[in-house]
Image: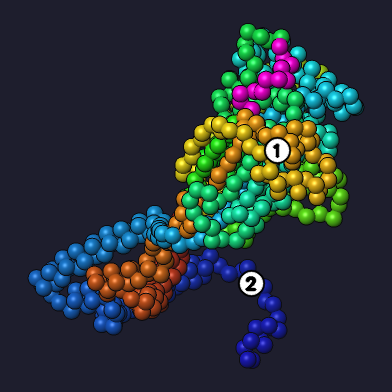
Amino acid sequence: MGNLVNRIFRRYVPPDTNTSAVSLIQENLEKEKLYRQQRNFARLRLRLLRWLVWMDFAGTTTLHGPAHISTTRGLTRMFYCIVVMICASLFFFHCYTLLLFYFQYPILTAIKYENMDFRYPDITLCPHSPFTVSQLYEHNETAEMMEKIYTMAKEKWWKNLDLLNLSPNANIKKSMLGGFYRNSLTLGKRVFDHVLFCELNGVDCLDQFILTEHPVYYRCFTLRLKSNPPFPAGPTHGVQIVLHRGLAYSQSLLVVDESEPFLVQSNVPADNLTGLETNNSTPHPKDGFYIAFHEPRTIPNYPLQNLPNGLTLRFGQFTRIGLTSLDMQSINIKQRPCVPSSKTPKIQLTRNDRMSESNFRSDKPMAEETLSEFEYTKQSCLANFRQILTKRRCDCFSESYSIPYSERHVGLKYCLSVDQTTSNIIKMPEIMACVEKIENMTDAEIVAEVEPSMPGDGLSLCPLRCDYREFHVDLHYSSNLKQDFDAENFITYFQRKKMVGENSTLNSRIHLNGSKINSSDLIFLDISPISESVNQIIEDRAYSLIQLLSELGGVSGLYVGITIYTIAEVIDYAVRFLMIYIPYLWYQFRYKRQKKMNRSFQRLMENIRQGEE
């Protein structure tokens, strides 16, 4: 303690600058000699103790190879060296195989047959025609504006000979989408205009339809069944739906069958380009509905033809559809990431059709709400990303996808719109090329370009949901209806219509005590599951980290005898060896440094001496 106090409070004594060069040389030579002695002592200590440290480690460690090599001599030592080399080689090879297998992320798939009850998907019915000629040519402000847009679109897509091979009616339909949305409260088809009958196992389901917005079809009818399983399987045990053509003596306008190739969707003969207004007395042969099956509470905000389980329905036909379902329980792996449903955000879309509904419930009046919300799917996320990228690069919205809610503030400007700005019409070929380029991009390219700005857009990279259910059309067949039907067969429809009021346009040709309903105006649907139960596929990691450690422990015990204690023994050996090796290195360093300094000083003195001579 006293030495510490003296070191702190002692008076500073400056170094003696009068010391002669000879005394400095002598002092440095003494230091060199001292460091050499300390180095030699540390080296001797290292040579004496390193073998003892090694033998102590070899005698106590679980590694049997060092013990055998250290305690034997001659041919016996050579024999054990060969054995240790072979065992070590086999150990490293076996460990490499186990690690390689682990990092390949093997998946164990369990298939449980008939393990869950069948649940009906959401059934979306989309008319091939968005509205009728009578709606377009009514004498009111809305009809006049829509007629003006229709005339402008015809001039654009029919009169331009360079664009005749681009399905003009389909492009006219796209050009009128913005006008339809601006007048959606008074325009468009409704459920009671077309759905006459709906039953699930004898229980009425007419009140379970909702109107959904779809950019390709304008407005669709989605049947969201609320009944609980189990459901009987087989024909006539599922959902029966009857669809009607609609208002009498009013021709459907812009009938486009989206399931056909784009070049043949126009439905107007090529040799009669002037006859754009169709004959009201002759129905379109392609008029009908497109039906799609998708997961409950989701929405296909992209072309329905991207779904593998959609069908085209024609009027005058009976169609029977057999559904199968598959429940998936996936796991999240690096090569195919997925997200549990509990952690996925809702897909939020801009609500342009003021008559549409969604999962979102708001306190606002229905006509004023601008948000629609549905469950997350990978396809919906990708559709949002494509729309965002289209807006970013083409400065407009594509008519093939719904608009994300995050883009609601930029205005309703569609790429094929003909009624907003003349610059949009002038740049139409350039805009169409831009839109087509984005539509042809792969999913990987899309997710690499777009990051969601808010959770409602989707998730980054658009992963799958880990738990989802697939629906497939296992079989279907159609036959022509050959007899007309009495209106009494659809008594439930008339009761429902009377209860909601006379707000439906479907009242000019169907009457309770009137004539029979023409079979050419009807579509009969019979949708049922093939089986009452659903197969379940459950994925799990085939090789976990615990299993890898267990395998490595067994391999090490088989070949080299490594355990967890071996790690502690190796650390103990390393510390003890460094305690005798580091002092040698330190004194060796100080000795060499002092020796180098002395030689430099001696050289300097010799040069001075030679200069004086």
Taking the magenta stretch, the answer to whether it contains residue 153 is no
Taking the magenta stretch, the answer to whether it contains residue 286 is yes
Q: What residue type is disc 1 on?
A: His
Q: Is residue 57 visible?
A: yes
Which x, y percent locates residue 179? 80, 29
Residue 145 relative to residue 581: left or right: right
Q: Element at badge 1? A: helix
Locate the N terminus by quadrant: bottom right
Q: Distance between the residues labelled 1 and 2?
A: 109 Å
Between 590 and 113, the one lying in front of the other is 113
Q: Is residue 432 above or below residue 411?
A: above
| Mark 1 neighbour class, 10 Å CA radius: few under 14, some 14 to 19, many 20 or more | many
Q: Give the range drawn in magenta.
A: 275-289
| Mark 2 neighbour class, 10 Å CA radius: few under 14, some 14 to 19, many 20 or more | few
Determine which residue is flagged by label 1: 194
Between 187 and 606, the one lying in front of the other is 187
Q: Nearer the observer, disc 1 or disc 2?
A: 1
Residue drawn at x 89%, y 24% as measured from the top left = 139
Which x, y percent locates residue 100? 35, 56
Residue farthest toward the left in the current orientation of the protein: 75
Dot 1 or dot 2, earlier in sequence: 2
Residue drawn at x 49%, y 39% as measured from the top left = 476
Q: Is residue 596 visible?
A: no
Residue drawn at x 79%, y 17% as measured from the top left = 151
Residue 479 relative to residue 220: left or right: left
Q: What is the magenta segment's predominant secondary structure?
A: loop
Q: What residue type is disc 2 on?
A: Pro
Residue drawn at x 63%, y 50% as measured from the top left = 199
Residue 295 relative to residue 43: left or right: right
Q: Which mark is residue 15?
A: 2
Q: Element at badge 2? A: loop
Q: Quadrant of residue 547?
A: bottom left
